Structure formats: C-alpha cells, structure tokens
Amino acid sequence: MESPTPVLDLLFPRRCPVCDRPVKPFGALICGECAKVPQPVGDSVCCKCGKPVAREDEYCADCMKMRHLYYRGAAAFHYRSVSGSLYRFKYDGRREYSDYYGREMAQVLEHFLEELGPRHRPDLLVPVPCSAQRLRKRGYNQAALLARKVSEITQIPVREDLLARPKDTKAMRSMSALERQNNLKKAFHVYGNGVRLKSIMLIDDIYTTGATIDACSGALLGAGAKEVSFLTLAIGENDL
C-alpha cells in the first residue's frame, strides 16, 4: 500500500517501522524486506484477551486466573517482534509508524468482528489516554494516532474526548499484575454521557496483564457503556 502523502515523503523521507531507514520502495509504508519481521498473532488465541495460546487451549494462563471487565480483545502482533519499533513509536517521535500499524490493526479488527458477529461491532473507538504531563513530554498520544488510522479505514467513529487520565501514574514495566491494578485505581475518568448504551472498543499500543484495559473498562462501564472490547498493536506472552 502506498503512502497517502508522497510529496511529504519526498521532502521528509518516511521511516520504515522495522529498520527505521527511509522506506524502500519509495511511497510504501514498510520496506519490502522488513514486512515479514512483525509476527502476526495468528488464529490460535485466548478466547478472552487474544494472547497466543496452544491450539488445544481455550484461555491463556492469565485469563484462567483472573476476571476481566472487558468483553473480548484482539491484537495485531507479538510484542517481541515489534518491541524496538514500538519504543521508537512512543518515545522517539516516529508518528509515521501509525500509518502502517493502524492499517494492520484495521485488518485484524475486521477479521475479529467477523468472528464476533454484527451485534458486537463497536459504536465508537476510544484510545487509551495518557496524562497531560506525558502528552506534553511526548507531544502526542500513540494510541490516539492508531485509533485515527483504524477509524479512517473502518469508518467507525473515534472519540478522544470521552476518556481522560487526570493524573500521571507510575511506569508499570516492572510491576506485578496486582501492583498494576493498584497503580491504576481511579486513574481514568469519563466525561459527559457520550458512552451511555454504546459499545466501545478501546485502542492501545500494547496489552500485557490487562490492568490498563480493565481500569478503562471499569470507568466506561460505570458511566453506562453497554460493552467494552479492545484492540492493540501488540500483545505480550504470559511471561512478559
């Protein structure tokens, strides 16, 4: 698929989300030789969170141990196959990565919705928000960039004004599942009545333990949402 902004690409060459060099061939979203590096999650996944599982398993180890507030979830790629790319996307200003990753997420979403059926098609896409402090530091919310691209392709409306993260929370990379849950208590707030009786799909960059998605889901369901599901760019294994 060609880039939607070839003139800008000529002036400011688009970087490949895998090798981070100017994309070859010109106008593409990812280098031809790099396209096989991101590993799709595939079809053998947990029936709740969408983590990869053995073909004979219905649920992953995490979902067999804990109850989640969201309905279902899906992801595009194995985390380890895109971890370096994801870091650059979040912290090194590589906003253009969202064009490729958003396109891949949209394809996963359409397949996911075929499986779930039309009654579970979301009314709105809602990106997981970051705090005002992190937004100022980073300059953008990577989840919002992904949500906009998915919305552009699927025509499902995206709303960035409904869910907010009023306070900055601690980084959770080294936290246990319980510590993550405690860290995110009352971290998210819903504004207005825009989610009432709506089916919401949260959009984020990565799913690990589910603490962030559950915290967002709790806020949305508490504000009257009918159902909450999620779609992420990457998903970790149970030992992540």
Image: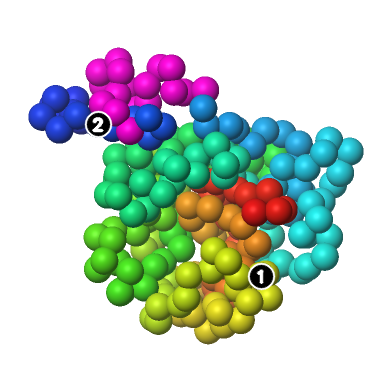
Q: Give the image's coloring scheme.
A: rainbow
Q: Amino acid at mark 2?
A: Arg
Q: Report which residue position mark 2 lands on.
A: 14
Secondary structure beneath label 1: loop
Visible in this render: residue 118?
no
Is residue 116 positioned above or below 223 on the image? above
Secondary structure beneath label 2: loop
Badge 2 crowding class, 10 Å Cα cut-off, few under 14, some 14 to 19, many 20 or more, is many
Is residue 155 positioned above or below 103 on the image? below
Q: CA distance from mark 2 to mark 1?
A: 37 Å
Q: Could you say where residue 40 lies in the image, as x and y percent from the top left? A: 60, 33
SS assignment for the magenta stretch, majority:
loop
Residue sitting nearer the eye, 16 or 42: 16
Which labelled disc corresponds to residue 155?
A: none
Q: Which residues are magenta?
A: 20-36
Split into 4 quadrants, where in the image is the C terminus? Answer: bottom right
Q: Could you say where residue 226 lies in the image, as x and y percent from the top left? A: 62, 67
Question: Residue at horizontal 27%, vertical 49%?
Answer: 93
Q: Report which residue position mark 1 lands on.
A: 176
Report whether 181 appears left or right of 169.
right
Visible in this render: residue 42?
yes
Residue 175 occupies quadrant: bottom right
In the image, residue 86 lies in the stretch drawn in magenta: no
Residue 139 occupies quadrant: bottom left
Split into 4 quadrants, where in the image is the N terminus? Answer: top left
Residue sitting nearer the eye, 210 or 150: 210
Q: Residue furthest right?
A: 56
Question: Residue at horizontal 58%, vertical 66%?
Answer: 174
Q: Amino acid at mark 1?
A: Ser
